[in-house]
Image: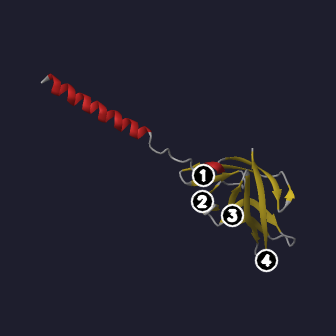
Amino acid sequence: MKTRHTNSVRTLLVVFTFILLASSCSKKSDPDPLDQYVGTWNETMVNGKASTGDKVAISKSGSVLTLSGFTANDFTATVSGSGFQADNRNIPSGVPFTFNDNSQGQIYLRNLTGSLTGDKLTLTFTVYVASSTQQVTADFTEVFTKK
């Protein structure tokens, strides 16, 4: 009887050890591709010309990126394709603008997208300002490096 009990325990130990080894050899999860966006970025170029004005901080929660410091208010972006796109198509900058005729509007960023190439973050967007009498749009491409 004692031998039968000993054999059962040995069998259970062998099975348990095999399961433990198999689970420790399982494929490790790949790093989250969103992590490469996270951090503080310093502007190096605007529309092909050297610049050092803007900074942007990017954090993540789940699959959503939050950009801070680029405009007066934080805004979120969702990954799409090889980059990300702002969730809000018209992002208020919090900056007023006065036209030559003294009409006023607020500056908005439209269609902001971002992508990474090596250690460079590229943001593209359109600046849009409208008042009751005028409107202006201008396209921008800004390049940032990680701080």
* Residue contact between numbered discs 3 and 2, judged by CB atoms under 8 Å: no
Question: What numbered label is drawn on residue 79?
Answer: 2
Circle 4 SS class: loop
Given this view, does label 4 or label 1 mark the residue nearer the observer?
1
Amino acid at circle 2: Val
Residue 28 location in percent, x, y?
A: 49, 44
Dot 1 corresponds to which residue?
34
Give the left or right position of residue 139, taking residue 88 as reference.
Answer: right
Dot 3 corresponds to which residue?
112
Circle 3 SS class: strand
Q: Tell me which numbered mark, 4 or 1, is placed earlier along the sequence.
A: 1
Amino acid at circle 4: Thr
Q: Nearer the viewer, residue 31 or 89?
A: 31
Q: CA distance from mark 3 to mark 2?
A: 12 Å
Residue lying furthest left in this view? Answer: 1
Q: CA distance from mark 3 to mark 1?
A: 17 Å
Give the left or right position of residue 94, taking residue 59 as reference.
Answer: right
Residue 34 location in percent, x, y?
A: 60, 52
Q: Tell me which numbered mark, 3 or 4, is placed earlier along the sequence.
A: 3
Determine crowd level at label 2: few under 14, some 14-19, many 20+ residues with C-alpha closer than 10 A.
some
Q: CA distance from mark 2 to mark 1?
A: 8 Å
